[in-house]
Amino acid sequence: MNSLARVLFAVLLCISGALAQGFGVKFLGDSHLGSDALIQAFRDEFFGGSDDSVGFIAPLMPKFHASEALRFKNEGFEIISSRRDTDPDFPLCGVIARARNGASLQIELKKLSGEFEVEVLHRVGGNGEIFEIIDANGRKFRINHLLRNSWEYTRFTLAFPVQIRSLREGAELGGYKIYRKNGSFADSCASNGAYSSVYQKWGKNAFIRDLARLDYELFIIAYGTNDALDSNFDEAKFYATLRGLVRSLRKGSRRAKILLLAPPRSPKVPNASRAAAVIRHLASDMGLMFYDFDMAMSEDGGWEGWRKMGLIRPDEIHLEAGGYERLGRNLARLLKRNLIEF
């Protein structure tokens, strides 16, 4: 039994029972997750089509990002991102949708249907009615904001597609929790170009507030490529930053397990192996699970072998969708296999 199998056995033996009752997974990472291809392949393999919730979703998808769970139609909302913009209180995942007066947003579910519990995160520099919501059954609701310049949730039972209309200039959306009781899901906080420190721009209450009432059993952290691209890559700083993220997640969901992923070894990322070593070291120090994507790729000739198979993008840093799908399926199978065997 290899070390990864031993760790998986020790911390995730109860997963098979949890899957029957609902199981939440959150991915946090950079552009390797941004297209959602890896995560969707993980969903399909891990849940076998039994996932019936969405989890926490950013209010809109920034440019070059996608969600396999939702489709957005935006008219008049500006996207503000923690990767490139500033705000004193970014919500979890670091995306804000700021409305012009009369702006509208339609949210459609791509695969799921029926009614869901939906918690809408909102903020405005005042109070009063700021958004109108119309669901697929024609039901209309108003969001009444109470606390000036503070994030608040308002909860509804809604059928999709859902339309959100702005009633006030500058009213903001910070995300949505979309779920069913005991529902299973895998959601993500992914940002192209993100360093592992991006979470430090999120508000001090974001982890506790925005993880609440969603039953996360597993967090999967997949940063490192952008950190390792930095010519001044500092191993001690990278270690401390990731450790801080782990501690923040534990504050928000104390019983969830945490898996650290080491990034693919692109020849364009000279410090990738150093970053992977730091991630492995942190996992060992904090008793976390660890998996190295290089392990999966090395079975087919590593980076060069995957390039020959057409799974590497021309930029020599990212994978084609098929490559990410292979990694997502492999990760899900590894988790399930070890759990079933033990």
Image (cartoon, grey):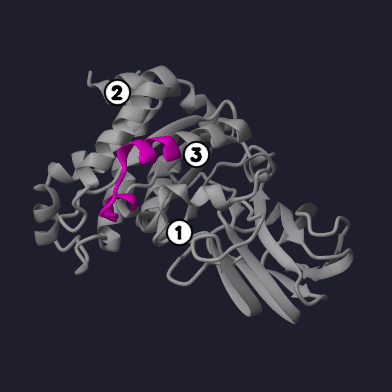
Residues in magenta?
A: 227-242
Q: Is residue 74 magenta?
A: no
Pointer 2 with pointer 1, Cβ within 8 A: no
Which quarter shows the N terminus? Answer: top left
Q: Secondary structure at mark 1?
A: loop
Q: Residues within 10 Å of mark 2 (few under 14, many from 20)?
A: some
Q: Residues within 10 Å of mark 1 (few under 14, many from 20)?
A: many
Question: Marks 2 and 1, Cα distance to the nearest angstrom?
Answer: 30 Å
Q: Is residue 156 left or right of residue 338?
A: right
Q: Which residue is mark 1?
A: 191
Q: Nearer the viewer, mark 2 or mark 1?
A: 1
Q: Nearer the viewer, mark 3 or mark 1?
A: 3
Q: Which residue is mark 3?
A: 245
Q: Amino acid at mark 3?
A: Leu
Which quarter shows the C terminus? Answer: top left
Q: Which mark is residue 5?
A: 2
Q: Is residue 17 left or right of residue 279?
A: right
Residue at the image position 71 percent from the left and 75 percent from the top: 99
